[in-house]
Amino acid sequence: MGVILGERHLLSPPARASSPIMTDSTTSSDPTGSSDHHHHHHDQSIQSIKKLKKFIISPNHLNQFIQSDTHSQVCQFIEDLNQSIIDLALDHPIEISNNVELLLNILDRAHQIALDHPPIKNSTSRFGNPSFRKFYDQLNQESINLHRSLSIKKESHIEELANYFTESWGNRERIDYGSGMELNFLCWLLCLKELNVYTKEDYPAIVLKVFWRYIEVMRFLQSTYWLEPAGSHGVWGLDDYHFLPFLFGSSQLKNHKYLRPKSIHDPDVLDGFSSKYMYLACIQFINSIKTASLRWHSPMLDDISGVKTWEKVNSGMIKMYKAEVLAKLPVAQHFLFGELLTFPNQTQDEQLNSQDDSIVVDSHGHLRIKGQPGWGECCGIPIPSTFAAAAAESNRSPFTSNPAVKRIPFD
């Protein structure tokens, strides 16, 4: 029997200290209780990124992926999650199963790790704060152990889950975040479903509680560490960082009696409903950190507000996600494959790649073919985060005791 979960607040104390996942010294899954066992897994977690591999390096690989079972799985998963929350607000009372509660504990731990590594004073730079790397390293170190609470039998599956989870929070070297990392989190959720950690009955809780908690923690990281937007489309993207909250958020509003897509322009609507609906929360968030009007800084969202129904917005979002995220090489080349989410003809491709000197990995972690121009759209020129730009325009020091985003006046 699960429990009804009260609302979690971003800056409230994270998971209970008594939670089985809260300490590195957890030994419940270690029959020997030996410290060597823990040390062994510490080493594994540092190396574990090798458990997942990138296979998409050319348009041909991308086409293989688009026609694969894995691609179908991802698309079907998005559509099923989307369907499960039609007309449900974020505060809709939902039964939370014990395993979903454990997933929320894991996310709370990620938030606590961020609190433990505040940003360093970096006033000369408007780019990402180096303290993010300390957050990433500690999360990476703890990730495998965190996943032991889920009673997954196969060690390699635990390692793959830990990989997807660690790679959901941003790129360690570039201190940036984009739709590829958000996709890693979706893959984490999909793999957990494939391993029967939760069932379809849990889908509403997975979106409204687990996914939304992830977005809350991500907003905290973005504002704390000034994560740069990876491969930002600038004003032509939905949001500097996220796509899926708009997709799921439009499903929440599908048959709302009063709220229409154009309602995003009404400040009273945003104030009254942004705590209940992801889409409105995202608009409220964008407005709080951008100094111009929505029409100037987010013309695509402004255009979408002219669509008559949320149903059309929602179906358009799903099509757009498939086209702009899953079918574009600059994003899809970062897709991570393993035992749980496989690439077609993996063995053959692995052999080809290992024997082919023309395939290189550049400093951004992109697979490239020597002599071919790079895919600059992925990272392009580093762009300072909106938070950095906002802080530069503000007289306040951004490093206060509470690193959450401060509203910036529009005059």
Image: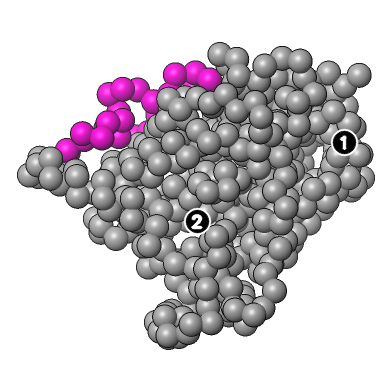
Q: Is mark 1 on a helix, strand or loop?
A: helix
Question: Looking at the rendered structure, which numbered label has been put on residue 187?
Answer: 2
Mark 2 or mark 1: name the one nearer the start of the chain. 2
State the extent of the magenta-drawn residues as a range.
1-28
Q: Which amino acid does label 2 sit on?
A: Cys
Residue 212 lies left or right of residue 229; in this view the side is left
Asked if marks 2 and 1 touch (Cβ < 8 Å), the reply is: no
Bin the neighbour count of mark 1 within 10 Å (Cα to Cα): few under 14, some 14-19, many 20 and up: some
Residue at position x 54%, y 27% in the image: 119
Label 1 sits on what residue type?
Leu
Specify few, some or many for label 2: CA neighbours under 10 Å numbering under 14, 14-19, or 20 or more.
many
Tell me residue 75's x, y (percent). 60, 63
Quarter of the figure with residue 88 = top right
Screen quadrant of the N terminus: top left
Query: What is the distance, in whole Å, between disc 2 and disc 1 at their CAs?
Result: 31 Å
Camera-side residue: 76 or 345? Answer: 345
Is 209 colored magenta in this rendering? no
> Residue at horizontal 69%, vertical 67%?
375
Residue 110, position as x, y percentages in the image: 44, 34
Provide residue 4's location: percent of width, then percent of height.
45, 27
Locate residue 229 relative to residue 139 in the image: left or right.
right
Residue visible at 55% across and 65% down? Answer: 362
The residue identified by callout 1 is 294
